[in-house]
Image: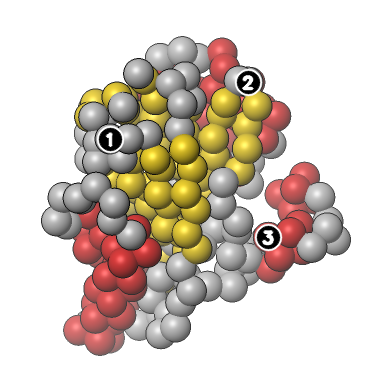
Amino acid sequence: MRYTWAVESHVGRVREGNEDSFAPPNDGASEGPVIIAVADGMGGHVAGEVASRLAIDAATVPDPDPGEDPAVRVMSANAAVIEGMRADPRHAGMGTTLTLGIFEPDGTLRIGHVGDSRGYLLRDGVLRQLTQDHSLVGQLVAGGHITADEARTHPRRHLVTQSIGMQKIDVDRVDETLQPGDRILLCSDGLTDMVPDDDITDLLLQNEGLSDAAWSLIDAANAAGGVDNTTVAVVDVGP
Ligand code: MN
């Protein structure tokens, strides 16, 4: 399978620094296996930035082999963030989300996921969320207590139930069989807090170019207030 991707990140209109990290560092193309990942750090001062960077670096080395379990990489990111806290007390309490996809040569996408960043699949014009948010409101949505739209503006929407850097984490695994024409979106909550899924769908459909699509999403998040850092990875699946 042929994968092409663009990854873009923007600080937004309110925050002073960008605590999101991502991989790969540059746009590109590959037959797979290739790792594409988004991490959204949290913590005082520069700790959030440190946490997301440590997680991405630990999770993406070495290069992937076909058939790998992405949860193993998420666990090594967790170990790296915990070690980072131990090594530098200024970083105590830091954490990060990590949503990591391994795109396989045979068209399998294997996702390992902790936190409230998200993976989506756009197929035949329909956007489907592949990951479940590890957050209070994510649990409320999953239980049918509130709608996804209500979750977006819920006052406690930023309360995550697990993140990288906790002693005990339970990594979600999602496998998806991709088809040519599919488009995958990985993103931080800077996008999904600001832009409803219907608008994300429209922008992904209207912008054929990968970088155009990525920037249209970031522009929409910033137009809606841009209260957080926004990172988006858009991946097109070819024959
Ligand atoms: Mn965020």
Query: Which residue occupies the foreground of this view, 209 or 219?
Result: 209
Residue pointed to by mark 2: 125
Vertical relation: 23 (above or below) 97: above
Q: State the residue at coordinates (19%, 50%).
A: 65
Give the mark, 2 or 1, whose residue is nearer the N terminus.
1
Residue pointed to by mark 3: 138
Q: How is the model colour-coded?
A: secondary structure
Element type at mark 1 = loop
Q: CA distance from mark 3 to mark 2?
A: 24 Å
Residue neighbourhood size for the residue with mark 2, other residues' Cα within 10 Å, grouped as few (<14), some (14–19), many (≥20): few
Report the quarter where the C terminus lies. top left
Residue 119 at least partly seen: yes
Amino acid residing under circle 1: Pro
Give the mark, 3 or 2, whose residue is nearer the N terminus.
2
Residue neighbourhood size for the residue with mark 1, other residues' Cα within 10 Å, grouped as few (<14), some (14–19), many (≥20): some
Mark nearest the camera among 3 and 2 is 2
Vertical relation: 224 (above or below) 21: above
- Pointer 1 residue Cβ closer than 8 Å to ligand 1: no
Q: Are marks 1 and 3 in contact (CB under 8 Å)?
A: no
Amino acid residing under circle 2: Gly
Query: Which residue occupies the foreground of this view, 125 or 208?
Result: 125
Q: Quadrant of residue 164?
A: bottom left
Give the mark, 1 or 3, whose residue is nearer the N terminus.
1
Q: State the residue at coordinates (63%, 32%).
A: 127
Q: Position of residue 66 (x, y in %)?
A: 24, 47
Residue pointed to by mark 1: 105
Residue 42 at least partly seen: no
- Pointer 3 residue Cβ closer than 8 Å to ligand 1: no
Element type at mark 3 = helix
Amino acid residing under circle 3: Gly
